[in-house]
Amino acid sequence: MSKFFNPFKWKQNTRTLWMSFLLPALIMTAYFASRHMAPFGNSTLLTVDLGQQYIDFFSAFKTIITQDPSQLFYSFSKGLGGETFGDWAYYLFSPLNIILLAFDNVHLPAGILHLTVLKYGLTGWSFAFALHKMHWQRGWALPVFGTTYAFMGWFVANQFNLLWLDAAILLPLIILGLEQMLLGKSPWRFVLPLTAIMAINYYMAYMIGLFLVCYMFWRITWEPYGWRLRLKMLAKFAFGSIISVGLSCFTWLPTAYTLMNSKSQYMLDDLHWKFDYFAPDILGKLFGGTFNFDQMPTGLPNIFLGSLPFILLWFFITSRSVRWQVQIMTVLITSFLIVSMMYGPLNLMWHGFQFPVWYPYRFSFVFCFWILWLGASVWHPSLTLSWLQSLSLLIIAGASVVYLYYRLPKLNFLDQNQLIIGSCFFLLLLLMMTLENHNRYWQILLGITVIAEVTCGTVLTLNNFSYLSNTEYQTYIRNLNDITEPLKQPQKHTFFRVGQSFARTKGDPFQGQYNGASTFSSALEYQQSRYMALIGQPEGDNYIDYNGGTLVSDSMLSMKYMLESNNQEPSRPGTPANTTIFSRPDTQGIYTIEKTNPLTMLTKNPHVLPVAFGSSQNALNTKFETDNPIENQNRMWQNMNGYQSDPIFTAANFENVKSYNTKTSKKITGAFLKKTDKGNASITLEFTPDSDDPYYLTLGNEMNDDNVEIHINNEVIKKVPSHRHTIILPITNQRKGEKQAITFIFKKDDLWLQNVTLYKANLDLFKEQASSMQENGIQLTKNSATNISGKINLTESRPLLMTSIPNTPGWEVYVDGKKTETQTVNDFFIGVALKAGEHSVTFKYVTPMLKPALTISFGSLLFMVGLAWSESSKRKHSLNR
């Protein structure tokens, strides 16, 4: 065995650096195996956003790399179609994701476990490597500090947010590179890791950038530098930072432009000039296991590091061996970071002036790094606290524990057992740091105690969560893969979207590799949410969910296929029947069955409109009403047809109202009902269809899952989707003469029947008009995510080229070879006013600002290469002399 592959012949620090990687990785592997997580059993790491959002992006990552690189820039699997370069820059640019390419989407949970373990190991190694190169620590201390850093409260709490973890890995390397650059070594040591985090995740890079400014103020107090030297140090820092910004421009500049079209619409929302919580409660977060599900939406910052780092912090700011100027700056920066984790405006600043949705205080990893970095800078095996230091710290700690004990009823993340465990570890470590006999056995015991405490905190935290079973996940994904197989054939000459009445997540289109109409993205274009609200679909700032469509909306949005449940095994987790949101009875007997399997059927819409078609110019003048989606769809459809014919949808009346434990109201829409007595209460609305036409019901945003349970003909709607505007619920079809009953069961003492209205669709009129518009559809010659081309024949009555392609920045339209101005149709889609006749049309998507961004990044690289060559030439010239 060669020396390179023989650990027994490695130098001590080489072995300990390997241990810094392996120790946290092996501990986490053992924990995951004990929890039977795939590939060790039938559980997974999937929970909250990891299971509901990120795993779908990981599936899309493999599609981009192995099948369709054009989706790096744009994808019609992102809702109705959206820019994706910014999404990937936030979710997928970590080079470590390459490990996921070895797993298909059925086995992605196992791949995610491997990736998570790898990131734990690299985080421990990174911190240990930085300490080693700083010559602050060596030997066994490296894996102790490295494991402490890997198991910090922020990292464990955000284990489910894999996209952020690279920031913790790279931060020690960035600081190390900065230190070496300030000492006159190559600026590349600072520039490369800083550029890496800017390219991998601009969001976390922004937080690191703010911290670096604080760090530099602390760094220039290390020695009694002259003001010129301090300015020189600041200039080096500014130079390296600017170069990094330039090199990473190819990711952040296009992304920044995209964010102006999404997140920036909500900047400074929820700004309050006050503290977010009672400040002393943050002391509870110094104990292990203080992160749980209740802490995700509006919790306190996760700053657990174990006892030793805070003992060393106290030594740092009270020891005479540290310059008082450094101590003062340390206290100021530490105080600033703590106040930032409490005070609303400062917290908002750290998050890019946009309040985070769940996972508050996402920047607390810089605080954890800061505390541990300070402690590692002063610790050595012979370090001993004076009795005065120990006694004063004991008094502070004791007062904190007493306060937290009496505060326990108000804290949902801390209990008495956690207080006892944390206090015992603290007392033991404080005693050990006060004793003067620091022999080898003392050092071993100290290391074991530190690792035991942070491991205990990690286990307690992760035990607070329940996880998706591997069987449930694989049942759903295997079924989705099977039923959508016909849709994955090469589709160069046709464009279509796929609707679905069931869903595991809003990212199913990424998993199934089809164009859908639902998505969950932190960079969602606000126009998508606005349009979905107009047509009665659930939406939010970062998601849209097409699950209550109508025949009209299906047709307008090119919904050629529909995934529907066969209603088999509804109690089995992961089946379509178990995950159905709103069924689509309005399509029965109208859409034809293309494929079935034991759980699902794929149906085809014969009345779908192509992605581009001829329309009346009246479509440019459509006016919309807030919270009136059926009327909005009526207006869209009528104006597309170019004449004021009868509307497709008309209001229908209920013929009978039955109430239980509440007074019957003559007026249904807008009625406010209260319980007459305690107990259950309900109201049932009955109607009998006078034709086989589809019927739909609208529900205002007060008709939500918190307030009401809905039954249609005694079948319960499992969960009413969260919605901010009025939504549409498909009711029935082909039920002429059969009495229908809609029951609303109160979940509270009162119920507001907000916008509860019944509508009937004129099926014959819809079929006739849809067939007419299909005649002027585009004949595609090319179809990709970024290029749709074809020929279309427009008539005098329908000279407007109308599409279901979102009119968002980046799209360019060429008609007969010439770039043509576009207009926005139905408040969202691309339209082009043309003359009657045949035209060749091409829709091209170019990521906004990508070309200038690439130019800046390439120019920055040339500048640095030239600078390095120049410096090298100077050194050679100096040596030759």
Image (tube, rainbow, N blue to C red):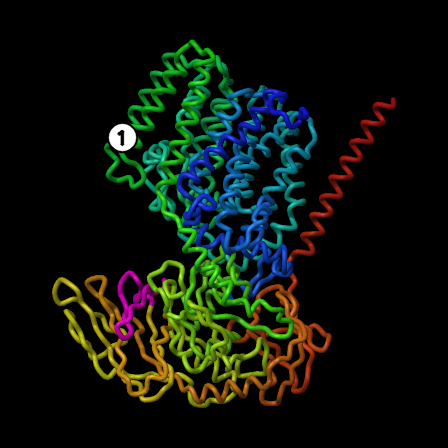
Whether residue 135 is in magenta: the answer is: no
Q: Residue at x 66, y 56 (%)?
A: 850
The residue drawn where x is 61% and y is 60% is 71
Q: Residue furthest top?
A: 437
Give the residue at the far right of this rendering. Answer: 881
Neighbour class for label 1 at 10 Å: few (<14), some, many (≥20)?
some
Left or right: 191 with respect to 305? right
SS assignment at label 1? helix
In this rendered view, identify the residue nearer to me: 527 or 731.
731
Asked whether 705 falls inside the magenta stretch, the response is yes
Q: Please tell me whether residue 9 is drawn above or below residue 680 in the rendered image.
A: above
Asked whether residue 98 is in view, the answer is: yes
Residue 23 point in image, percent of width and height? 50, 30
Q: Position of residue 699 (x, y in %)?
A: 33, 71
Pick the quarter of the image with the N terminus. top right
**Three-letter code, disc 1:** Tyr
Q: Quadrant of residue 283?
A: top left
Looking at the rendering, the stretch of residues picked out in magenta corresponds to 701-722
- Within the image, what quadrant is residue 780 found in? bottom right
- Choose between 361 and 560: the one closer to the eye: 560
Q: Most prominent secondary structure in the magenta stretch?
A: loop
Pointer 1 residue: 403
Is residue 842 in view from this perspective? Answer: no
Residue 19 located left or right of residue 629: right
